[in-house]
Image (tube, rainbow, N blue to C red):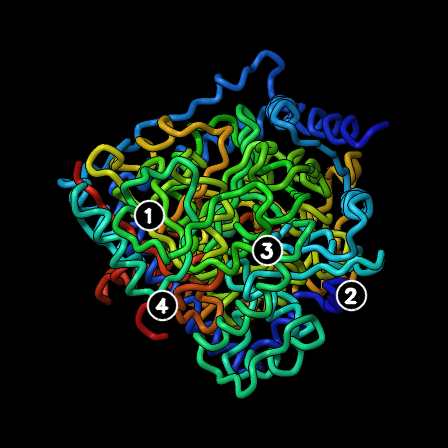
């Protein structure tokens, strides 16, 4: 007998107490919890919660965005930046040409990416109540590894359009068969005597730019 | 990994050693109290917590009652998305499958993200025996692995180590596994985390095979979910060419929408955060992004035996948040190792004996590693009635009865007169002999009243065998005294740390 038959057979015998005509939907699940906790101002709540988990939050309007990104890269001393294929070109239009642009290429190795200082991306959406940005590999976000290996991530969120209140509001907007990365502040560990240390693996610095259209 | 849970002493002996270890105790007390208070705050932010908790329990119940349906559905979805599904009836089978899959890649090294399922089946030892090196990449697991040690807490496996010990372990052992610790490494957590980052970086960048578990698997879509903090999970799930995930069959949830409940319950219960830093979700494979090959190994290893017990079944709802450990007065004093399995604390006390049967002294003593104070139930985000399951398992130890072992119904004999019973009695006495535990234990009777056992379980049984259980007052004397003479404690549902500590 295959492992599959053994396990499924055991499951069925174990469930002998479940009436044969019971269907999964016969087991009630009350969904009377809140779909949003209604933050008064979702964008403000997002900013607060991001900052609470040590993301650096900036604000700009569309015109000021290229200048802001250029400044953030310069302050960090970045000499190179990975760009996903669909990044709006104007976002980096203020950044000097001597900051090397590195394409998100299929044949780039993790070692190649490790030599790059920063990455700039957009996002799929952001969740106010939890201070989360979600990436779904869209054209302005690229492969998962480009937001993982470089040590500095600048993520642009269009507000208020891309901001939802809550997790229950976010899930229906996301497509499950895309690879999704939910990011709530830079990585952290409390493994040593529960002292929180921000920045273990992944980008140790996360900068989120809230852009008003 | 050298450490093993096999041959561990029964709970009371192991717990006694832990209590003598002052440093371990103070680490544990500090850690559990810190997390406990933060959790209470994170939970209080959501006024609908009780309803989320009920929904979480209900979704898990729905899944468990129709587990065959959802597993088949999951297999279909994962396969359609380009993944390969394997089924393992027990630990040996799972280890054999993973070893074969790694061998087929031609690689001799894998990177691992913390997974209790692989800890449970002893995967690292099996891979080592096959000449494959398994590199743990969670900071705590790294500390444990470099120290030839065993994890002691679900969430913070190295909770029993303080910074000085961790510095020494890194300085002495990192070189054996790869990049050595930097010269002059201090014991500041920031420096230690940096040393781990550098040490592991090389491994991630070169990794060809990743091994993980998963927190949730969505039957409807075939999506796997891993919730983490450090980013080592993303590294292991994204950079290798081959990804192998070993996941217990109870981790399946029916629909994508169900994640809206668990992604609210888990982070707040576990790390006391609104959301953990990183959550990865993937469905099969994605052209040009991440591993080209994805294997899902579905693990039984005693879960179907647990499922067969209509009372014990609820243990399979567990989402491994560890909240029950942090409020448990017995865990706080005994430490995680005393539980002798990958699953410490209250959940371990009900899960381990069911996954493994209560044949050994250790497993028979586990259901007694509790004062039945009920704090674990109060904090459990999926409302597992751990005291109820404990009482039930005690009855089984003492009275024997029908159980399912490896899929076959058998009758276990009562432990009376056997070493197992003596171990159980000692565990019980141990719990009752410790003042802090006892205080909490005063609520035993209160709870037991609701549970209405036919007999007092365990040591009380000999006494009740010849007498009817006397009508207990609706409130224990001590509860009444506290209610009427003392100020109410700040937090309800957890009277373990009030006056008279
Ligand atoms: S039993 Fe409940 S509280 Fe304990 S780890 Fe599992 S889900 Fe968390």
Asked whether, in this view, residue A1 is left or right of residue B432, the answer is right
The chain to which mark 3 is attached is B
Q: Which residue is mark 2?
A: B7
Q: Is residue B446 visible?
A: no
Q: Tell me: is circle 4 under 8 Å from ligand 1.
A: no
Which mark, residue B488? none
Q: Are marks 3 and 4 on the same chain?
A: yes
Mark 3 closeness class: few <14, some 14–19, many ≥20 residues within 10 Å: many
Task: Name the front one of labels 4 and 2.
Answer: 2
Task: Name the front one of labels 3 and 4.
Answer: 3
Q: Are marks 3 and 1 on the same chain?
A: no
The chain to which mark 1 is attached is A
Mark 4 closeness class: few <14, some 14–19, many ≥20 residues within 10 Å: some
Residue at (57, 29) in percent of width and height: B222
Instruction: Locate the C terminus of chain B by quadrant.
Output: bottom left
Q: CA distance from mark 3 to mark 1?
A: 28 Å
The chain to which mark 2 is attached is B
Q: Are marks 3 and 2 on the same chain?
A: yes
Q: Of B24 and B405, which appears nearest the observer? A: B24
Q: Are marks 1 and 4 in contact (CB under 8 Å)?
A: no
Q: Position of residue B139 (x, y in %)?
A: 54, 65
Secondary structure, mark 1, is strand
Instruction: Locate the N terminus of chain B by quadrant.
Output: bottom right
Q: Which residue is mark 1?
A: A155
Q: Tell me: is circle 2 under 8 Å from ligand 1.
A: no
Q: Position of residue B73 (x, y in %)?
A: 61, 22
Q: Which residue is mark 3?
A: B114
Which residue extends farthest bottom? Answer: B184
Is A166 above or below relative to B129? above
Q: Position of residue A79 (x, y in %)?
A: 40, 61
Secondary structure, mark 3, is loop
């Amino acid at each position: 007998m295959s492992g599959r038959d053994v396990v499924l057979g055991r499951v069925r015998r174990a469930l002998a107490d479940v009436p044969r005509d019971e269907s999964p939907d016969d087991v009630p699940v009350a969904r009377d919890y809140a779909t949003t906790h209604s933050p008064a101002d979702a964008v403000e709540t997002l900013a607060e919660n991001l900052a609470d988990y040590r993301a650096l939050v900036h604000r700009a309007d569309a015109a000021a965005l290229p200048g802001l990104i250029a400044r953030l890269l310069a302050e960090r001393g970045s000499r190179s930046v990975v760009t996903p294929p669909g990044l709006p070109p104007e976002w980096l239009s203020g950044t000097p040409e001597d900051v090397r642009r590195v394409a998100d290429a299929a044949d780039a190795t993790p070692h190649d990416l490790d030599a790059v200082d920063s990455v700039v991306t957009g996002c799929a959406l952001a969740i106010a109540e939890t201070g989360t940005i979600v990436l779904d590999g869209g054209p302005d976000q690229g492969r998962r590894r480009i937001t993982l290996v470089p040590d500095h991530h600048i993520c642009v969120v269009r507000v208020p359009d891309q901001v939802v209140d809550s997790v229950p509001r976010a899930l229906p907007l996301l497509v499950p068969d895309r690879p999704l990365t939910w990011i709530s502040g830079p990585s952290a560990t409390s493994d040593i005597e529960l002292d929180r240390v921000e920045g273990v693996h992944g980008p140790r610095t996360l900068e989120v730019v809230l852009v008003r259209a | 990994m050298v450490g093993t849970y096999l041959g561990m002493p029964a709970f009371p002996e192991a717990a006694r050693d832990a209590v003598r270890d002052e440093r371990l105790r103070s680490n544990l007390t500090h850690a559990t109290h810190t997390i406990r208070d933060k959790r209470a705050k994170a939970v209080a932010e959501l006024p609908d917590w009780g309803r989320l908790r009920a929904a979480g329990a209900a979704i898990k119940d729905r899944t468990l009652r129709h587990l065959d349906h959802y597993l088949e559905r999951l297999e279909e979805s994962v396969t359609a998305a380009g993944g390969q599904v394997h089924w393992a009836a027990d630990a040996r089978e799972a280890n054999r499958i993973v070893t074969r899959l790694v061998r087929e890649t031609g690689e001799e090294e894998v990177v691992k993200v913390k997974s209790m399922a692989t800890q449970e089946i002893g995967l690292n030892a099996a891979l080592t025996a096959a000449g494959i090196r398994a590199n743990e990449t969670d900071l705590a697991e790294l500390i444990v692995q470099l120290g030839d040690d065993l994890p002691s807490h679900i969430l913070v496996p190295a909770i029993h180590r303080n910074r000085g010990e961790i510095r020494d372990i890194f300085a002495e052992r990192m070189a054996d596994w790869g990049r050595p610790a930097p010269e002059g490494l201090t014991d500041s957590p920031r420096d230690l985390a940096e040393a781990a980052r550098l040490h592991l970086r090389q491994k991630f960048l070169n990794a060809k095979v990743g091994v993980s578990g998963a927190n949730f698997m969505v039957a409807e879509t075939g999506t796997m979910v891993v919730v983490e903090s450090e980013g080592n999970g993303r590294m292991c799930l994204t950079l290798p060419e081959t990804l192998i995930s070993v996941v217990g069959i109870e981790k399946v949830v029916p629909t994508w929408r169900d994640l809206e409940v668990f992604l609210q319950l888990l982070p707040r219960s576990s790390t006391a955060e609104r959301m953990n830093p990183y959550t990865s979700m993937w469905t099969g494979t994605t052209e040009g992004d991440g591993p080209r090959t994805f294997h899902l190994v579905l693990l039984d290893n005693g879960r179907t035996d647990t499922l067969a017990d209509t009372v014990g079944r609820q243990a399979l709802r567990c989402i491994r948040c560890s909240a029950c450990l942090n409020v448990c007065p017995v865990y706080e004093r005994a430490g995680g190792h005393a539980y002798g399995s990958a699953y410490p604390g209250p959940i371990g006390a009900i899960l381990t004996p069911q996954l493994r049967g209560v044949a050994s002294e250790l497993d028979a003593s586990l259901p007694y590693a509790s004062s039945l104070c009920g704090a674990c139930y109060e904090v459990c985000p999926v409302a597992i009635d751990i005291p109820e399951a404990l009482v039930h398992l005690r009855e089984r130890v003492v009275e024997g009865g029908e159980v399912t072992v490896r899929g076959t119904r058998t009758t276990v004999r009562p432990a009376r007169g056997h070493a197992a019973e003596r171990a159980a009695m000692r565990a019980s006495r141990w719990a009752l002999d410790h003042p802090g535990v006892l205080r909490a234990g005063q609520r035993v009777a209160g709870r037991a009243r609701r549970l209405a056992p036919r007999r007092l379980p365990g040591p009380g049984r000999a006494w009740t065998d010849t007498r009817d259980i006397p009508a207990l007052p609706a409130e224990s004397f001590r509860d009444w005294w506290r209610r009427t003479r003392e100020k109410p404690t700040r937090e309800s549902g957890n009277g373990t740390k009030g006056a008279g500590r």
